[in-house]
Image (cartoon, grey):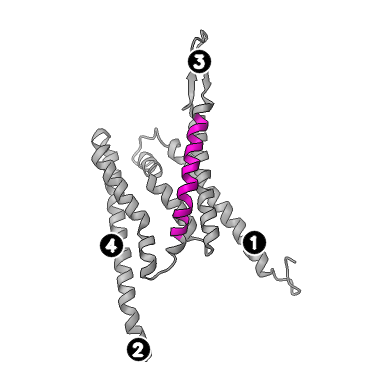
Amino acid sequence: MSASRTGFPTRTSSRSRSRILAFSAALTVGAVLGVLGPLLINATDPVGHPVHLVLSAGWSWAALAFCVGLARESRVESVVLAVASLVTAVIAYYLTKLGQGQYLTLGRGDPSGTPYVSWGDFASKTLVWCVVACVTGPVLGLAGNLARDHGLRGLPFRMLVPVVAVVEMSERLDVEAPLQRPIVDTTWSGVRLVAVAALVVLVGRAVMTWRLRPSAGQADK
């Protein structure tokens, strides 16, 4: 039954509704991330292009799966929803690029020069990254779930996304930034700075919490 004798929803009904909402939210956020990245690629304004750079970075996709896992109490749900959100983001990403004409090509020997869609290229890239999503999604989703532990045991998991951001942005600044526009260098430097600050805050908060716990125990005595 979906309701008790008093007319109030049962706990089972509430949990089912929560799972449906969580699944819908994970798919929606994944789709938005997948669409906005390529959609803003040609943006030249001071806001649109940095947003494109951030949403197209690997750490943003890792953060998506991590946050989905962080939002759920069940480890199984964290893993499943993380994978679902990443796969949705991948499909949305490549469908958007397909709509932008990314996979249009000209047939060899075609005198009319009519472009056609290279479905093989589109399908192969989509499939490869869906496989990557299925491999990395469980790890990131589970890490997000384990990060719910506010003690020192959860600290390494809470540090995962900022560490990934620092490493990726540092590599991009060393290899790619000299070949890009100044706005790219500024964006990646800013992301790295925020990630480092997040690491400092996370570590400092965990240490302070750990140091205060013995004092609280002594006060109870």
The residues colored magenta run: 122-144
Label 2 vs label 1: CA separation?
A: 42 Å
The mark total stands at: 4
Q: Quadrant of the C terminus?
A: bottom left
Q: Position of residue 200 (x, y in %)?
A: 28, 62
Label 3 vs label 4: CA separation?
A: 55 Å
Q: Is residue 137 magenta?
A: yes
Question: Could you say whether the residue bearing mark 4 is in a helix, strand or loop?
Answer: helix
Q: Is residue 132 magenta?
A: yes
Q: Of label 4 and label 1, which has the lower sequence position? A: 1
Q: Which residue is mark 4?
A: 200
Q: Which residue is mark 2?
A: 219
Q: Of label 4 and label 2, which has the lower sequence position? A: 4
Q: Of label 2 and label 1, which has the lower sequence position? A: 1
Q: Which residue is mark 3?
A: 107
Q: Position of residue 133 (x, y in %)?
A: 48, 45
Question: Could you say whether the residue bearing mark 1 is in a helix, strand or loop?
Answer: helix
Residue sitting at x 41%, y 44%:
55
Q: Of label 3 and label 4, which has the lower sequence position? A: 3
Q: Position of residue 210 (x, y in %)?
A: 33, 75
Label 3 vs label 1: CA separation?
A: 51 Å
Residue situated in front as seen by the camera: 157 or 103: 157
Identify the mark at residue 34; answer none if there is no mark: none
Question: In the displayed image of the protein, which residue is found farthest to the bottom?
Answer: 221
Mark 3 in CB contact with mark 1 (< 8 angstroms): no
Q: Of label 3 and label 2, which has the lower sequence position? A: 3
Label 3 vs label 2: CA separation?
A: 79 Å
Residue sitting at x 39%, y 35%:
43
Q: Which residue is mark 1?
A: 16
Residue sitting at x 35%, y 37%:
45
Question: In the displayed image of the protein, which residue is found farthest to the top?
Answer: 111
